Amino acid sequence: MTEMRERIIVALDTDAHTALALARTLQGKVEWLKVGMTLYYAEGPEIVTKLREMGFKIFVDLKLNDIPHQVEGAAREISRLGASMFTVHAAGGRAMMEAAVKGACESSQECGLDTPDVIAVTVLTSIHDDDLAAIGVGGSSAAQVERLAKLAREAGVQGVVCSPLEAARMRELLGLEALVVTPGVRPAGSDAGDQSRIATPAQAVAAGASHLVIGRPITGSDEPGAAVDRIVSEG
Ligand code: C5P
């Protein structure tokens, strides 16, 4: 059985200096770090290499969405950096997701690296049904999440990002092998901040999450390592 410590992905939504200091504190405490748009666009691809060289697995969360040729190229470059997981928007369509998988497989093989898992973002949790209607998508966000998750499965990606409240349905739809990555995780008794659809780490895993993206409850703590230990002992 996978241990809670192996499931935690710490989101480093900070500047590079803070990110590297956090990474040093978290060595031996977690396996995964997430580099999102803010850190990546500020520091460039080297931040992925630096964190990887410290021994972490890196989740590059840039939510790719472009024509298949461009996404295949981006997937090749992300894979060459040694990322272990990266995101694409399922709304970019089947051919685009297939291009991401192809780029990741080919490039990692050429470089002799492990092939990163491609993870599809379905509907951002910041989007409401009204927002979907405004961009011409009829029906509920729940229906759209399911439609895009099925498309992602057909395209051959390895998993999806979703809220903990959608994790059980995603697990049912995608099967036991799929990766189900959930942000919006808050340890019992901690501040929810701007997250609204939240669950505790144990609840998220019970619902079917394979990985938990946790940011501020760890990165905002005076003792990030101890915050991880508390989450692990809770779970
Ligand atoms: O600090 P916190 O634990 O809220 O961070 C959660 C991380 O997950 C952030 O990096 C945020 O961008 C990401 N995320 C999210 N909700 C989504 C998708 C991603 O909070 N629906």
Image (spheres, rainbow, N blue to C red):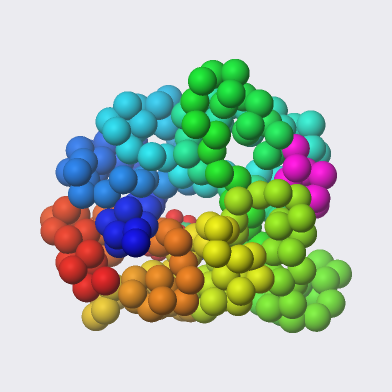
Residue 70 seen? yes
Residue 51: image location, x then y, percent: 34, 33
Q: Quadrant of residue 2?
A: bottom left
Query: Against 193, is 40 above or below?
Result: above
Q: Would you say the magenta stretch is mainly helix, strand or loop? A: helix
Q: Residue at x 76, y 69 (%)?
A: 147
Query: What is the quadrant of the C terminus in the image?
Result: bottom left
Judge whether residue 124 is colored magenta: no
Q: Which of 2/139 is in front?
A: 2
Query: Against 228, is 117 above or below?
Result: above
Query: What is the quadrant of the N terminus in the image?
Result: bottom left
Q: Residue at x 73, y 46 (%)?
A: 97
Magenta-colored span? 91-99
Q: Which of 144/31 is in front?
A: 31
Residue 18: image location, x then y, percent: 27, 41
**Residue 137 left/right relative to 30:** right
- How many marks the image carries: the answer is 0
Q: Residue at x 33, y 75 (%)?
A: 202
Query: Against 35, is 55 above or below?
Result: above
Residue 154: image location, x then y, percent: 76, 55
Residue 203: image location, x then y, percent: 38, 78
Q: Which of 55/194 is in front?
A: 55
Residue 74 seen? no
Q: Residue at x 26, y 40 (%)?
A: 23
